[in-house]
Amino acid sequence: METITLQCPITVKAKVTEKFKTDMLHNLNRQIEKINAEVSHIEKDMKKVLAEQSTGDVQRVSMLLQRMEEEKQKRLSYRENIKNQITDTEGLEVGAEVVQGTLQRLVEVKIGDTMPGIMNTELLVEDGKIIEMRD
């Protein structure tokens, strides 16, 4: 066998710009608005269940309220995580590089190739455009 094709990760990094920060903060704030609406909806549903409690099975109503409270707490926890991300994003310096995620690529390798050169590939993106490929 002379060559083999491997699937290798590519790290995608974003170069921080004012536009990047603005877009990130906008998306994070939209997520918080969505979570707030979901929490409000859950609270309304809980009040409705409590108001109808006298007509139903108390144990079933209690279990339902408990599940609703758990869902509410999950969303509140997620909201706190997003608030932390907002703080982190606001603190980013223009020009810094942040990891956005990973992609996969197919690479044909042969005897004598170096693994670090294959495994450590990065793409640098600035405002949605690839500006550099690094090995």
Image (cartoon, rainbow, N blue to C red):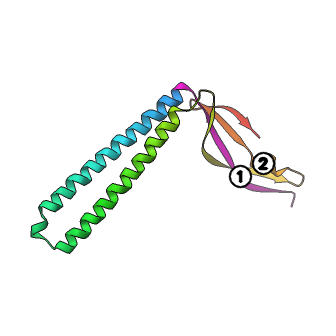
At label 1, the amino acid type is Cys
Q: Earlier in the sequence, mark 1 or mark 2?
A: 1
Q: Residue lying at the far right in this picture: please name it.
A: 112
Estimate the x, y position of residue 85 in percent, counting from the top left.
49, 41
Q: CA distance from mark 1 to mark 2?
A: 7 Å
The reply, left or right, for residue 71 in relation to residue 62 is: right
Asked which secondary structure carries label 1, the reply is strand
Q: Is disc 2 surrounded by few (<14), some (14 to 19) or many (20+) residues within 10 Å? A: some
Compared with 92, 4 (above or below) is below
Magenta stretch in the rendered image: 1-18
Picture residue at 52% right of the left edge, 26% below the top: 19
**Number of numbered markers:** 2
In this view, the residue in front, 104 or 1, is 104
Residue 4 falls inside the magenta stretch: yes
Picture residue at 60% right of the left edge, 45% below the top: 101
Q: Is disc 1 surrounded by few (<14), some (14 to 19) or many (20+) residues within 10 Å? A: some
The reply, left or right, for residue 31 in relation to residue 91 is: left
Picture residue at 87% right of the left edge, 57% below the top: 2
Q: Which residue matches tag 1?
A: 8
In this view, the residue in front, 106 or 40, is 40
Picture residue at 85% right of the left edge, 50% below the top: 114
Residue 5 falls inside the magenta stretch: yes
Q: Are the residues at dot 1 and dot 2 in contact (C-beta closer than 8 Å)? A: yes
In this view, the residue in front, 125 or 26, is 26
The reply, left or right, for residue 39 in relation to residue 14 is: left
Compared with 112, 134 (above or below) is above
At label 2, the amino acid type is Ile
The reply, left or right, for residue 100 in relation to residue 132 is: left
Q: Main secondary structure of the magenta part?
A: strand
Q: In what quadrant of the picture does the N terminus appear?
A: bottom right
Q: Which residue matches tag 2?
A: 118
Estimate the x, y position of residue 33 in percent, counting from the top left.
34, 40
